[in-house]
Amino acid sequence: MSIKERIFRYLKRRQQKRTTAFPHFENIRSALVIYESDFQEKNLVIQDIRGNLLKQNIDVVTWGWLPNKKNITSAILPQSRILGASDFHFWGTPKDDVLNDLDKRQYDLLIDLTQSTCIPLHYIALYARAYFKTGKVLPLTDGIHDFMIDMPNESSQAALFNQIIHYLMIINSND
Protein backbone atom coordinates (compact mmCIF):
# COMPACT_ATOMS: atom_id res chain seq x y z
CA MET A 1 0.00 0.00 0.00
CA SER A 2 1.39 3.40 -0.97
CA ILE A 3 1.85 6.31 1.42
CA LYS A 4 -0.88 8.23 -0.46
CA GLU A 5 -3.31 5.36 0.13
CA ARG A 6 -2.37 5.25 3.81
CA ILE A 7 -2.96 9.01 4.16
CA PHE A 8 -6.29 8.67 2.36
CA ARG A 9 -7.43 5.82 4.63
CA TYR A 10 -6.39 7.81 7.70
CA LEU A 11 -8.30 10.92 6.59
CA LYS A 12 -11.33 8.81 5.59
CA ARG A 13 -11.46 7.30 9.09
CA ARG A 14 -11.40 10.79 10.62
CA GLN A 15 -14.50 11.93 8.71
CA GLN A 16 -17.75 12.22 10.63
CA LYS A 17 -20.29 9.51 9.93
CA ARG A 18 -23.07 10.65 7.65
CA THR A 19 -26.72 9.75 7.90
CA THR A 20 -28.15 8.80 4.54
CA ALA A 21 -31.49 7.88 3.08
CA PHE A 22 -32.02 6.30 -0.30
CA PRO A 23 -33.32 9.13 -2.53
CA HIS A 24 -36.53 9.10 -4.54
CA PHE A 25 -35.26 9.62 -8.06
CA GLU A 26 -38.01 12.09 -8.94
CA ASN A 27 -36.96 14.27 -5.98
CA ILE A 28 -33.31 14.59 -7.05
CA ARG A 29 -32.69 18.17 -8.18
CA SER A 30 -28.88 18.40 -8.16
CA ALA A 31 -26.06 15.98 -8.92
CA LEU A 32 -22.29 16.02 -8.89
CA VAL A 33 -20.72 13.65 -11.42
CA ILE A 34 -17.03 12.83 -10.97
CA TYR A 35 -15.04 10.97 -13.61
CA GLU A 36 -11.66 10.25 -15.16
CA SER A 37 -11.21 12.65 -18.07
CA ASP A 38 -9.98 11.72 -21.51
CA PHE A 39 -6.67 13.27 -22.60
CA GLN A 40 -8.26 15.71 -25.08
CA GLU A 41 -10.67 16.91 -22.35
CA LYS A 42 -13.65 16.39 -24.70
CA ASN A 43 -15.42 13.80 -22.52
CA LEU A 44 -18.25 13.08 -24.95
CA VAL A 45 -19.67 10.33 -22.74
CA ILE A 46 -19.83 12.73 -19.79
CA GLN A 47 -21.52 15.36 -21.96
CA ASP A 48 -24.15 12.77 -22.93
CA ILE A 49 -24.65 11.81 -19.27
CA ARG A 50 -24.96 15.48 -18.31
CA GLY A 51 -27.52 16.03 -21.10
CA ASN A 52 -29.48 12.99 -19.95
CA LEU A 53 -29.69 14.33 -16.38
CA LEU A 54 -30.54 17.85 -17.55
CA LYS A 55 -33.50 16.44 -19.50
CA GLN A 56 -34.76 15.08 -16.19
CA ASN A 57 -34.58 18.57 -14.61
CA ILE A 58 -31.51 17.74 -12.55
CA ASP A 59 -28.90 20.48 -12.17
CA VAL A 60 -25.60 18.77 -13.00
CA VAL A 61 -22.05 19.70 -12.04
CA THR A 62 -19.18 17.62 -13.44
CA TRP A 63 -15.66 17.31 -12.05
CA GLY A 64 -13.06 15.32 -13.93
CA TRP A 65 -9.50 14.18 -13.22
CA LEU A 66 -6.67 14.20 -15.74
CA PRO A 67 -3.38 13.03 -14.19
CA ASN A 68 -0.87 12.88 -17.03
CA LYS A 69 -1.20 16.28 -18.64
CA LYS A 70 0.95 19.21 -17.63
CA ASN A 71 -1.59 21.96 -18.33
CA ILE A 72 -5.35 21.55 -18.16
CA THR A 73 -6.88 23.60 -20.98
CA SER A 74 -10.53 23.44 -19.89
CA ALA A 75 -11.81 26.50 -18.10
CA ILE A 76 -12.95 26.26 -14.49
CA LEU A 77 -16.69 26.86 -14.71
CA PRO A 78 -19.43 26.64 -12.10
CA GLN A 79 -20.92 23.60 -13.89
CA SER A 80 -17.74 21.77 -14.91
CA ARG A 81 -14.13 21.47 -13.93
CA ILE A 82 -11.20 19.22 -14.76
CA LEU A 83 -8.62 18.75 -12.04
CA GLY A 84 -4.95 18.07 -12.62
CA ALA A 85 -1.90 17.29 -10.53
CA SER A 86 -1.47 21.02 -9.73
CA ASP A 87 -4.76 20.92 -7.78
CA PHE A 88 -3.34 18.45 -5.26
CA HIS A 89 -0.51 18.50 -2.72
CA PHE A 90 2.54 16.26 -2.98
CA TRP A 91 0.90 13.68 -0.67
CA GLY A 92 -2.23 13.56 -2.82
CA THR A 93 -4.58 15.67 -0.72
CA PRO A 94 -6.64 18.38 -2.45
CA LYS A 95 -5.48 21.98 -2.16
CA ASP A 96 -7.58 24.48 -0.22
CA ASP A 97 -9.05 26.20 -3.32
CA VAL A 98 -10.37 22.83 -4.56
CA LEU A 99 -11.92 22.08 -1.18
CA ASN A 100 -13.44 25.57 -0.99
CA ASP A 101 -15.00 25.20 -4.45
CA LEU A 102 -16.30 21.76 -3.52
CA ASP A 103 -17.77 23.03 -0.26
CA LYS A 104 -19.77 25.80 -1.95
CA ARG A 105 -22.64 23.51 -2.96
CA GLN A 106 -24.79 20.81 -1.44
CA TYR A 107 -25.93 18.08 -3.86
CA ASP A 108 -28.76 15.59 -3.67
CA LEU A 109 -26.69 12.93 -5.42
CA LEU A 110 -23.02 12.22 -6.13
CA ILE A 111 -22.36 9.87 -9.05
CA ASP A 112 -18.79 8.57 -9.03
CA LEU A 113 -17.93 7.12 -12.44
CA THR A 114 -14.36 6.26 -11.42
CA GLN A 115 -13.37 2.97 -13.06
CA SER A 116 -10.27 2.15 -11.00
CA THR A 117 -8.52 3.34 -7.86
CA CYS A 118 -8.01 7.08 -8.27
CA ILE A 119 -7.09 8.77 -5.00
CA PRO A 120 -7.73 12.36 -6.21
CA LEU A 121 -11.30 11.49 -7.23
CA HIS A 122 -11.78 9.47 -4.04
CA TYR A 123 -10.94 12.65 -2.10
CA ILE A 124 -13.53 14.57 -4.12
CA ALA A 125 -16.12 11.88 -3.32
CA LEU A 126 -15.11 11.91 0.34
CA TYR A 127 -15.33 15.68 0.79
CA ALA A 128 -18.30 16.44 -1.49
CA ARG A 129 -21.39 17.56 0.34
CA ALA A 130 -23.99 15.18 -1.07
CA TYR A 131 -26.97 13.57 0.64
CA PHE A 132 -26.41 10.32 -1.25
CA LYS A 133 -23.22 9.00 -2.86
CA THR A 134 -23.01 6.18 -5.35
CA GLY A 135 -20.35 4.57 -7.52
CA LYS A 136 -18.48 1.42 -8.46
CA VAL A 137 -17.15 -1.04 -5.88
CA LEU A 138 -13.46 -0.15 -5.45
CA PRO A 139 -11.10 -0.95 -2.56
CA LEU A 140 -10.78 2.62 -1.24
CA THR A 141 -14.40 3.73 -1.73
CA ASP A 142 -15.87 1.48 0.93
CA GLY A 143 -17.28 3.83 3.55
CA ILE A 144 -17.55 6.76 1.15
CA HIS A 145 -20.39 5.62 -1.08
CA ASP A 146 -23.83 4.84 0.27
CA PHE A 147 -24.64 2.56 -2.67
CA MET A 148 -22.03 0.68 -4.70
CA ILE A 149 -22.37 -1.33 -7.89
CA ASP A 150 -20.08 -4.23 -8.70
CA MET A 151 -19.16 -3.97 -12.38
CA PRO A 152 -16.50 -5.71 -14.47
CA ASN A 153 -13.23 -3.82 -14.89
CA GLU A 154 -13.77 -3.40 -18.61
CA SER A 155 -17.13 -1.65 -18.17
CA SER A 156 -17.50 1.90 -19.49
CA GLN A 157 -18.52 5.10 -17.74
CA ALA A 158 -21.81 5.02 -19.67
CA ALA A 159 -22.54 1.44 -18.56
CA LEU A 160 -21.83 2.31 -14.93
CA PHE A 161 -24.02 5.42 -15.15
CA ASN A 162 -26.87 3.42 -16.72
CA GLN A 163 -26.68 0.81 -13.96
CA ILE A 164 -26.70 3.48 -11.23
CA ILE A 165 -29.75 5.22 -12.71
CA HIS A 166 -31.46 1.86 -13.30
CA TYR A 167 -31.10 0.87 -9.64
CA LEU A 168 -32.06 4.31 -8.34
CA MET A 169 -35.31 4.11 -10.32
CA ILE A 170 -36.07 0.47 -9.48
CA ILE A 171 -35.47 0.84 -5.77
CA ASN A 172 -37.76 3.89 -5.72
CA SER A 173 -40.55 1.98 -7.41
CA ASN A 174 -40.59 -0.54 -4.56
CA ASP A 175 -41.22 2.01 -1.79
Image: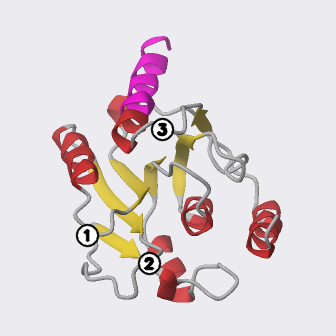
* Viewer-nearest residue: 78 or 156: 156
Nearest the camera: 100 or 71? 71
Q: Which of labels 3 and 2 is toward the front?
A: 3
Image coords of residue 7 (percent x, y): 79, 73
For residue 140, the mark is none
> Could you give the CA–CA distance between mark 1 and mark 3, rounded to whole angstroms?
21 Å
Residue identified by numbered label 2: 101
Side (left or right) of 65 relative to 51? right
Q: Secondary structure at mark 1?
A: loop
User: Depth check: 106 or 127 in front?
Assistant: 127
Q: Which segment is the magenta one?
A: 162-175
Q: How many marks?
A: 3
Residue at 49%, 88% in the rendered image: 86
Image coords of residue 44 (percent x, y): 21, 53
According to the picture, the residue beneath numbered tag 3 turns out to be 154
**Tag 3 near tag 2, CB within 8 Å:** no
Q: Answer few, some or many: residues within 10 Å of disc 3's Cα (few below 14, many 20 plus, some between 14 and 19).
A: few
172 lies above or below 48: above
Q: Is residue 69 above or below residue 154?
A: below
Identify the mark at residue 40; answer none if there is no mark: 1
Q: Identify the mark nearer the N-term, 1 or 3.
A: 1
Q: Residue at x 39, y 54 (%)?
A: 33
Give amino acid for label 3.
Glu
Q: Who comes first in sequence, dot 2 or dot 1? A: 1
Residue flagged by tag 2: what amino acid is it? Asp
Secondary structure of the magenta portion, mostly?
A: helix
In the image, residue 37 above or below residue 163 = below
